[in-house]
Amino acid sequence: MSARARVFIGTSITQKEVLSSEQERPISHPIIGLETVFDNQKALGVGIKGYVHVRTVKDTPTTLIIEKGKSGNVSFEIELISYSPSFEKVNLNIDPKGQVGWTSGRCYGKGEPLILLNDYVQYDLNGEITVYKNHPIIVTMTISIPEDAPSFELPIKAVGIGVDYVSVFDSEVNLIVK
Amino acid sequence: MSSKKIVLLCILPLFANTLLTTAIVNGKYSGVYLDRTPVSSSKVIFSTKFDIDDPTVLDQSTALMSVMSAAGGYGSGSTGGNGWCYQNVVACWDDGEVYYCPQAWAFEPPNSTVQQWSSARCLNRPFEDDWELYVAKMNVDIANEEIDFYWYAYETGDDIVSESYYYDYYSGMAHEDDHNFVVGDRTDTYHYRYTQVGVESTTEINGTDWKILQEDIGYYYSGSWRYAAGRTTIGTQSIIVCDGGDPDTAIRVGDGAEYRGVTVYDHADALVHWQNNQNSRISDDTSVWTGSGILNPIVSAPYS
């Protein structure tokens, strides 16, 4: 699915929801803060029926050291937090090499290569995924570092995961490649 | 200081209910617009630094934002007829963490301003160093009908010298007929200011001294990154585009209120340094710098 199609899906769904119930009410935030997202009543008050929470699983270390030629894993739990009986599922698109979600990288100086985390990442789930409320899924990111890769340090983000609704991504993991 | 790493990704339609002017961002806003005859540009850019005495006054519901806004256009010399605007935000939030927030806005009849999409992502580190430089760029990707957003973060002065940076990228939907950004200004029914940079918050940030530096504010034109003269654009006057409909609705940046207590601390060509100052205010359409020409940015990668 192209990035354009992905965004259109998300936009049309969200607009339809709000047009039906919130049309006359001005909203005062250019971006909704987490305080609002996490609060059932505040969230519903601004038309948010829930959110997708992407976070590293419990007991994930804050630093992941991977030697060249080896790989390491980070697992994320993806959960739909629903505040509305009508909000029962949400779609994700997982594609680290495509234009889905964010891209993250590091460059160590003028003339040096741009190192992209996305280039080293695979997930055990790929493509379009549906997440239902009360049924969180675990997706495991495998970071494989080739022998000839440069050394680098980079915060690990859940790159390449596109969500067609409000989402919160938590990650405390820093990657060190040496 | 919080060290949590959070990405907030949201696609949220927002609505305003005024008829002839409507806001695309609902925050207190004061900025600078590029003062020149309108031209088409494939990409726009600015850099920013934060200097905050006590970032802990910021929380999850209050962000101090440095924002660039540009109107979409559909052809050479166009003056923005689609009513879509694109914004690139670098902000301090949540005990001084920094986040990026690309956004697209449009007017949709009969009387709503709709945020087409918004995606925000906190970086994995708190704001710590006054040297920390963020360069934010928007490119029009005609083939894919998207706007490409780029960020380059330089953590220290040494990183700026060596050009060592963190890189982030996000691609978002554009209006299918937007083939460029419009740079400049034009007066018709309203005074349209098609490309702006400024400071914005949901509520004014008081309780600590802060400054925001915005520099190397430019647009790509005729093979070079260029800058034009800069003039203030405040509150209700920050009209960025119209939708071309009947009535012809004007869309402005911010909620129509100036960012009170903000003044220009320093300025130079393609540079404005904002400072909070409760005893001062600036007037709309005041000259900040008068020069124009080719940019000579402090770092090269984002401008390549």
Image (tube, coloured by chain):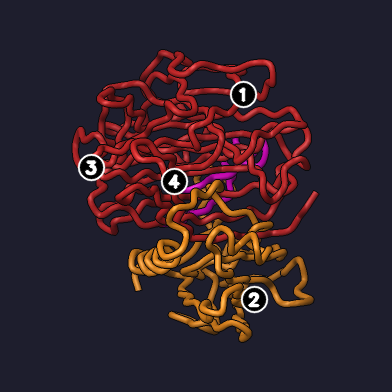
Chain colours: A orange, B red
Q: CA distance from mark 1 to mark 2?
A: 42 Å
Residue located beneath label 3 in the image: B245
Residue located beneath label 2 in the image: A76
Residue located beneath label 4 in the image: B16
Q: Position of residue B239 (x, y in %)?
A: 38, 31
Sequence order check, earlier mark of 4 and 1:
4
Inspect the image, locate mark 3, and give the three-letter code of the amino acid beneath it: Gly
Q: Residues within 10 Å of mark 3 (few under 14, many from 20)?
A: some
For marks 1 and 2, give the one nearer the viewer.
Answer: 1
Q: In the rendered view, tell whether residue B213 sits above or below residue B132.
A: above
Sequence order check, earlier mark of 4 and 3:
4
Residue sitting farthest toward the bottom? A135
**Quadrant hosting residue B195:** top left
Which SS class for mark 3? loop
Inspect the image, locate mark 2, and give the three-letter code of the amino acid beneath it: Phe
Indicate the chain on which mark 4 is placed: B
The residue at 52%/83% (across/down) is A125
Q: Is residue B156 magenta?
A: yes
Residue located beneath label 1 in the image: B262
For marks 4 and 1, give the one nearer the viewer.
Answer: 4
Q: Is residue B194 magenta?
A: no
* Label 2 with label 4: CB-CB less than 8 Å: no
Q: Is residue A169 visible?
A: yes
Q: Which residues are magenta?
A: B149-171
